[in-house]
Image: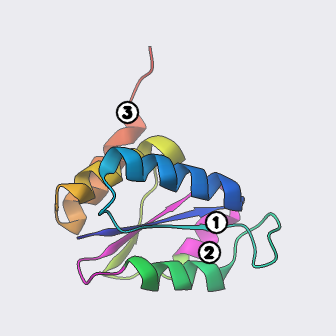
Amino acid sequence: MVGIVLISHSGPLAAEVAALAAQIGGENVPLAAAGGTEDGGLGTSPGLVEAAIEEVDRGDGVILIPDLGSSVLTARLFAGPDVVIADVPFVEGTIAAAVSAGSDMPLKDVLAAAEEARTFRKL
């Protein structure tokens, strides 16, 4: 199953979005929040992201979903063939990725579902 890592400048924001995605996508989806810094401050931490990737990696690939700014730069440190970055809205993209991962879709399809969230309209 594809793993998902949420990279946010805020630890509580990443944790809450991960909790929401787990409720919608299913408790079996490997999701990890890598928000804030090691000391609980605002920012992003390569160490937290690396640990989160290791936590959710089941061998089918990992999607990194950054929120903004330097979280994208942090995500780029870990991008590779089996670890991809989703350029998507943080909440909507995470939900779409979690639902797709929960259906045991392959990495490319989970990424495509997350990226489709860019076109979601609310009205």
Q: Relative to the observer, which residue lies in front, 73 or 29?
A: 29
Count of numbered circles on the image: 3
In-front residue for pair 79/17:
17
Residue 98 is covered by the magenta coloring: no
What's the distance in space between the residues labelled 3 and 1, CA to CA? Answer: 22 Å
Identify the magenta region. 57-75
Question: What amino acid is labelled 3 in the image?
Answer: Thr
Q: Is residue 17 left or right of residue 97?
A: right
Q: Which residue is mark 1?
A: 71
Task: Identify residue for label 2.
Answer: 74
In the picture, measured across the screen, residue 5 lies left or right of residue 83, that is right
From this view, report whether residue 27 is shown above or below residue 55.
Answer: above
Q: Residue at x 39, y 76 (%)?
A: 56
Disc 1 marks which amino acid? Ser
Q: Sequence order check: which comes first, mark 3 or mark 1?
A: 1
Mark 2 vs mark 1, CA separation in Å: 5 Å
Q: Is residue 72 magenta?
A: yes
> Which label's residue is closer to the chain start, 2 or 3?
2
